[in-house]
Image (cartoon, rainbow, N blue to C red):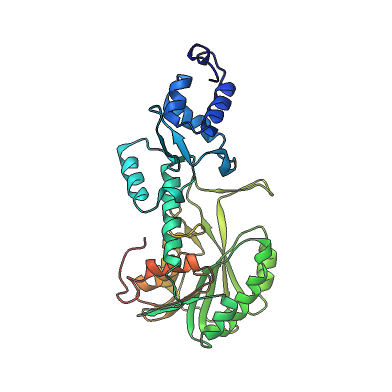
């Protein structure tokens, strides 16, 4: 026995947490630890959450309850503050096995996100390759290779979002070459961009295209990003407009769009649907071809198919490709449906 019940009343917070961890390593369940330390079970959960970065071996696969019986200890502890959150958690847990979840304290959003990732990975295992259905063509692979399959001067609008890291800067040159070849004479490339390496991005895009304009997507209040390397609150992101030589504008567009609340249900880098919808509707007509060589979660495809356009998407990541396919399959033949 590590301590008497009388002594447990006088433990400091640090000692209580350390003792709770030691008991958990011995295989004790949270209720049993709580009973020994004379605290609430929720207190034990919060204490153990402080050790969530420990290796998995720090927590046994089975635990012993107050009744002395051994049970699997793989189930996570989830905090749900309302009846609605409880319903969301239960719905998410029905789609993912307990062993696929980390053994630590989780909140509702974390559980739902893990459930979506698990479902996406399961879908990815069933992916056999490209999808050509109705008005949608989804190509699985690297855009530098699969992009060669898109016919010359066949795309009305190329709307996309590349990775922003420094290591990914060469992709902007690849995108410029692809767009210069596949865009129609009246076509346009519109791309989200980070601001950190913007001068190099602009230089690389200019290798095959002409600069047309610099726009901006204003992030909704309360959802800015922090750029620690520059000590900047990032409240807007650049939107780059590039065209082929000889381009002549046919429609008026705004260079600034106010984003709605972030949508990350389908991809970690998912952009807001409304922005893609605005430019697709303003710059193309029904039946036009819209292309996104970095498909991601498929948001550009949703906007294009919902508006009655044809869509070509390319994605190298099999999990993202499977998720985008699942999202677009209902729109590819009907051209109807919601954005989420």
Q: Foreground: 51 or 160?
A: 51
Residue 85 at x, y = what percent? 35, 41
**For the point 60% across and 75% down, which residue is it?**
175
Q: Is residue 153 left or right of residue 324?
A: right
Asked if residue 288 can be seen in this view, the reply is yes
Q: Quadrant of residue 173?
A: bottom right
In the displayed structure, would residue 142 be above or below residue 35? below
Can residue 261 be seen at all in this image of the molecule? no
Q: Nearer the viewer, residue 160 or 7?
A: 7
Q: Quadrant of the C terminus?
A: bottom left
Point 30% across, 38% down: residue: 83
**Residue under the point 47% across and 69% down:** 321
Relative vertical location of residue 164 with respect to residue 325 in this rendering, above or below: above
Quarter of the view holding residue 58: top right
Outermost residue toward the top in this view: 6
Q: Nearer the viewer, residue 128 or 188?
A: 128
Question: How many labels, in total?
Answer: 0
Residue 30 lies, with reference to residue 141, above or below; the image says above
Question: Where is residue 189 shown, x and y percent of the image?
Answer: 54, 74
Q: Residue furthest bottom?
A: 152
- Which residue shows up at 46% across the image and 39% down it? 62
- Where residue 208 appears, as percent x and y from the top left, is 64, 80
Percent coordinates x, y for residue 161 in the rendering: 54, 66
């Amino acid at each position: 026995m590590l301590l008497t019940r009388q002594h447990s009343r006088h433990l400091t917070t640090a000692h209580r947490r350390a003792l709770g961890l030691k008991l958990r390593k011995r295989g004790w369940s949270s209720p049993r630890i709580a009973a020994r330390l004379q605290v609430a079970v929720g207190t034990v959960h919060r204490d153990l959450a402080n050790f969530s970065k420990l290796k998995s071996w720090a927590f046994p696969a089975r635990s012993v309850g107050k009744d002395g019986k051994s049970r699997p200890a793989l189930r996570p502890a989830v905090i749900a503050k309302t009846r609605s959150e409880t319903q969301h958690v239960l719905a998410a847990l029905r789609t993912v096995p307990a062993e696929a979840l980390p053994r630590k304290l989780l909140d509702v959003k974390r559980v739902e996100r893990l459930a979506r990732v698990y479902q996406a990975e399961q879908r990815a295992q069933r992916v056999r390759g490209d999808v050509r259905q109705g008005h949608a063509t989804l190509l699985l692979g690297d855009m530098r290779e699969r992009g060669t399959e898109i016919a010359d001067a066949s795309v009305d609008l190329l709307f996309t979002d590349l990775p922003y890291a420094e290591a990914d800067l060469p992709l902007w040159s690849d995108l410029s070459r692809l767009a210069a070849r596949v865009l129609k004479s009246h076509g346009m490339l519109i791309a989200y961009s980070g601001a950190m390496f913007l001068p190099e991005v602009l230089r690389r895009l200019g290798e095959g295209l002409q600069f047309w304009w610099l726009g901006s997507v204003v992030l909704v209040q309360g959802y800015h990003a922090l750029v620690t390397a520059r000590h900047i609150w990032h409240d807007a992101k650049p939107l780059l407009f590039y065209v082929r030589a000889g381009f002549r504008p046919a429609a008026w567009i705004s260079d600034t769009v106010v984003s709605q609340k972030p949508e990350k249900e389908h991809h970690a880098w998912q952009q807001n649907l409304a922005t893609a919808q605005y430019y697709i509707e303003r710059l193309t007509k029904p039946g036009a071809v819209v292309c996104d060589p970095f498909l991601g979660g498929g948001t550009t495809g949703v906007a294009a198919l919902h508006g009655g356009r044809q869509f070509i998407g390319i994605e190298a990541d099999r999990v993202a490709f499977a998720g985008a396919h699942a999202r677009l399959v209902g729109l590819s033949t009907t051209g109807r449906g919601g954005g989420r």
